[in-house]
Image (tube, rainbow, N blue to C red):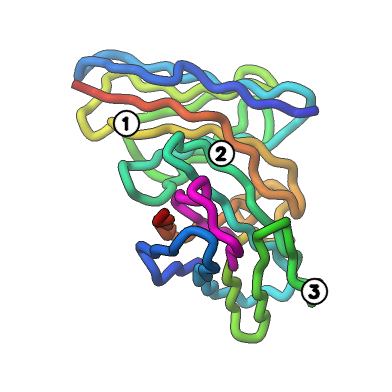
């Protein structure tokens, strides 16, 4: 069966420091991969999605970037964090078609 | 572009009672999929139920059922015999059937409804 792993679960980083969040999927090949951000008590904002290795689409211009170095690995990065980057980050995967997304357990990022 | 609207930011229900969460969507497509996701305090997103637009029969998963009205573009979630563990944010979502890897295939979420369950 397919599983999705996301880490770390929580992260406290100073302003101006770099960021790297990692997401991996097991038990499947060539999944579509997604990064979402969620502010406290708010909805989900799609940040990036990827349909294949090296293929990244950005939905919102921001201080973040994403990479997909391997088929089942999706990384969210920043060179210099801002206070506004604080939030809850969710990774998800899906296939093209009628299935929904399967989400990771999320990373709570606090920039101080 | 498709949109999903959840008009109830917060709802409350008494334990063991029934509650209905509303969702409407806007699309010009005839073939698509609709979903309800649950996000408990742990913030893990959990798929509750899925509906295929070309199926007239309403989807049901145990105590969760939907009322899918395609002409009205309405997709409400009914939770029967509410339990304390049902307290969560609930998100309605739309996905085009024409998703071949482009952005048109991405899930579109509503802003969510926070459900509280009173003991």
**Residue underneath mark 3:** B57
Residue drawn 67% across the image and 75% down it:
B68
Residue A73: mark in rendering: none
* Numbered label tally: 3
Instruction: Assess whether mark 1 and mark 3 are in contact (beta carbons under 8 angstroms).
Output: no
Secondary element type, mark 2: strand
Give percent across and percent down for residue A76: 46, 25
Give percent across and percent down for residue A82: 22, 27
- Rendering quarter of residue A10: top left
**Residue underneath mark 2:** A49
- Does residue B1 appear in this view? no
Residue B90 is a magenta residue:
yes
Give percent across and percent down for residue A16: 21, 17
- Image quarter where the C terminus of chain B lies is bottom left
**Residue underneath mark 1:** A63
Residue drawn 53% across the image and 52% down it:
B83
- Rendering quarter of residue A53: top right
Q: Chain of mark 1?
A: A
Q: Chain of mark 2?
A: A
Secondary element type, mark 3: loop
- Does residue A84 appear in this view? yes
Secondary element type, mark 1: loop
Between disc 2 and disc 3, the foreground one is: 3
Residue B82 is a magenta residue:
yes
- Determine crowd level at label 2: few under 14, some 14-19, many 20+ residues with C-alpha closer than 10 A: many
CA separation in Å, label 2 and label 3: 32 Å
Q: Nearer the viewer, residue A67 or B68?
A: B68
Q: Nearer the viewer, residue A70 or B73?
A: B73
Magenta stretch in the rendered image:
B78-93
CA separation in Å, label 1 and label 2: 16 Å
């Amino acid at each position: 069966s397919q599983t999705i792993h996301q880490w770390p679960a929580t992260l406290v980083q100073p302003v101006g420091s770099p960021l790297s969040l990692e997401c991996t999927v097991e038990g499947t090949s060539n999944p579509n991969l997604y990064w979402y951000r969620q502010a406290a008590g708010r909805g989900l904002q799609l940040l990036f999605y990827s349909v294949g290795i090296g293929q990244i689409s950005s939905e919102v211009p921001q201080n973040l970037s994403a990479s997909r170095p391997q088929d089942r690995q999706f990384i969210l990065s920043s060179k210099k964090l801002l206070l506004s980057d604080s939030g809850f980050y969710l990774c998800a995967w899906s296939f093209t078609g009628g299935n929904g997304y399967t989400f990771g357990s999320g990373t709570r990022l606090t920039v101080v | 572009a498709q949109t999903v609207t959840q008009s109830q930011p917060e709802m409350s229900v008494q334990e063991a009672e029934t509650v209905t969460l509303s969702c409407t969507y806007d699309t010009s497509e005839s073939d698509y999929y609709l979903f309800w996701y649950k996000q408990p305090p742990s913030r893990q997103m959990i798929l509750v139920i899925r509906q295929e637009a070309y199926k007239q029969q309403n989807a049901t998963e145990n105590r969760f059922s939907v009322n899918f009205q395609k002409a009205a573009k309405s997709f409400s979630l009914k939770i029967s015999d509410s339990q304390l563990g049902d307290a969560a944010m609930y998100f309605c979502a739309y996905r085009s059937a024409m998703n071949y890897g482009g952005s048109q295939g991405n899930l579109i979420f509503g802003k969510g409804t926070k459900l509280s369950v009173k003991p």
